[in-house]
Amino acid sequence: VSVVGTGSKLWEVPTGRFTSNLSESLQWEPRCQHQRLQDSVRITADIPPRLDGTWVSTCEVRPGPEFLTRSYTFHPSRHFQALQHYYTDSGCEDPAYSLIIRGRIRLRQASWITRGGTEAEHHLSKVGIVVHSLVAKQRLTSRLPLTCVGLRLGGAVPGKLYELYNTRAGRGCLAALGFSMMEMSLVRVETQHHNHGGKVQELFLGDIHTDWTQRTQYRPTGYQQPLQNAMHHIHPCPVCALVYRSSEQRPPVLPHRPAAPLALDGRWVSQRCETRPTVLFLTRDFTFAPDQHAWEGLYRHYSDPACSQPTFSLRASGHYAQGNPSVKLSGASEFVFKVTQVSVTAMDEPTAKLLNSTRRGKCGQAGGWEVGVEQDLTPTDGCTVLGIKLPHKEYELFKTELDHRKHPLLFVGERPTDGSSPDRPTKRPTSFQAPMMLCSGGGTQ
């Protein structure tokens, strides 16, 4: 659910020089009454990031949808080896094929577009593929050009490695798969320092374009869900060990997880400062009242990746209707949301000045914006400079899961990378944003 239809680069803040001792720090405590004090976490992010080691994911959903797990190893020599295991199901229980990718990465400079990120260049040397079943082979050969099938997959035997690409040939095969490692163009490493002395390290790589036709050329400005350092990860994480020990011949088969019943009742908040494409840093705070089919969302926007410098906050409300279970994503449900009311609060002088410069009737009371004072945008049917149009309808995708501590998580559909709105059924998301945690309600004290 979102009411900012288009991203604005007016809140870009250029980063400082590319120095090795630059570190951002944030004391992040989710605003939850039930959250215990010992859950508070201090987060640091070093620029340039330190990549050495192996980083692993749990089961991931990419736009399409595609289901995969990843295990990336970076060496001090700047060489990397990336394992991507693809599956036929959203639980990553039925492996289809695995890709083994070798190459080099060079960190370049602090990003001038996505504050807190580091730009990088990568060069691929080889990509190999292992098909894990005859059914998967048939599906792959229907997608690949005849040259790829004939030269590489024609006699493919499940479990055997075939070279799909090297520096001399095979680019067409990768393009047909929708394969790209452009995610390595944007890098960020965060370290969570927990009160009990433990630490968790996470690697953020660039986001994948929600439009399949754009993904191989897209240069990311946001992030995917992070990979965890195999040595410093959230405990317990049995999936981490499975992915870490995997190889192209032995893909991880994840244990079955029963679907959590979808129960929206209560208040849900972001677990961290979130980065969106088109340079938006924000946190989300949603409240649902299922008996009235009503919802309210508070979006706090910031100019920095630690969410410490607020620019504006946006409060939206309306109604929603739950539709059918998703046919594309097991365990997810389709929704339609209607936004009927939006109010905005400018949190700094540049934002107030920007909003005061809008034409009369286009964004609240022209000339009446003051820092810290909320304005209702309903009389002007939204705000053009913020990309808000009222009333507004969106076609959504929701899913709930339980985390490693059995706490409920809410997954909301990923926003279109181009900044547009999922205002038609055909634009309904096929992947998710970062999960939100249940704060209150729904039986949680």
Image (cartoon, helix red, strand yellow):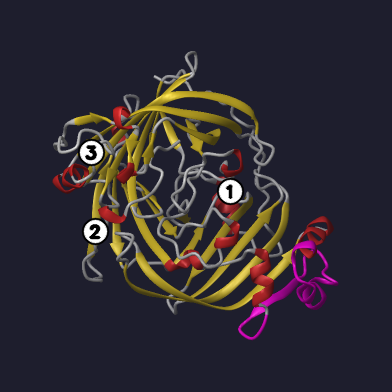
Place of residue 84 in the rendered image (x, y in percent of width and height, measured from the top left):
61, 61
Disc number lying in front (2 or 1): 2
Q: Earlier in the sequence, mark 1 or mark 3?
A: 1
- Specify whether 356 is left or right of 201: left
Question: Which residue is tagged 3?
Answer: 360
Q: Measure the alpha-carbon separation of dots 2 and 1.
A: 31 Å
* Residue nearest the viewer, comparing 53 with 361: 361
- Is 154 in the magenta? yes
First to last magenta residue range: 142-169
Question: Which residue is tagged 2?
Answer: 13
Q: Earlier in the sequence, mark 2 or mark 3?
A: 2
Q: Residue at x 68, y 62 (%)?
A: 98
| Label number found at residue 296 | none
Place of residue 382 in the rendered image (x, y in percent of width and height, measured from the top left):
34, 35
Q: Which residue is drawn at 62% across and 54% down?
A: 68
- Specify whether 150 is left or right of 121: right
Q: Is residue 252 above or below residue 3?
A: below
Outermost top residue: 291
Disc number lying in front (2 or 3): 3
Q: In this view, does 360 lie above or below 166?
A: above
Residue density around tag 2, few if under 14, some if 14–19, many if 20 or more, within 10 Å: some
Question: Which residue is tagged 1?
Answer: 61
Q: Measure the alpha-carbon separation of dots 2 and 3.
A: 28 Å
Q: Which of marks 2 and 1 is nearer the N terminus?
A: 2
Residue 39 appears anywhere in the view: no
Q: Which residue is drawn at 30% across and 32% down?
A: 380
Disc number lying in front (1 or 3): 3
Label 2 SS:
loop
CB atoms of marks 2 and 3 within 8 Å: no
In which image quadrant can residue 398 be found? top right
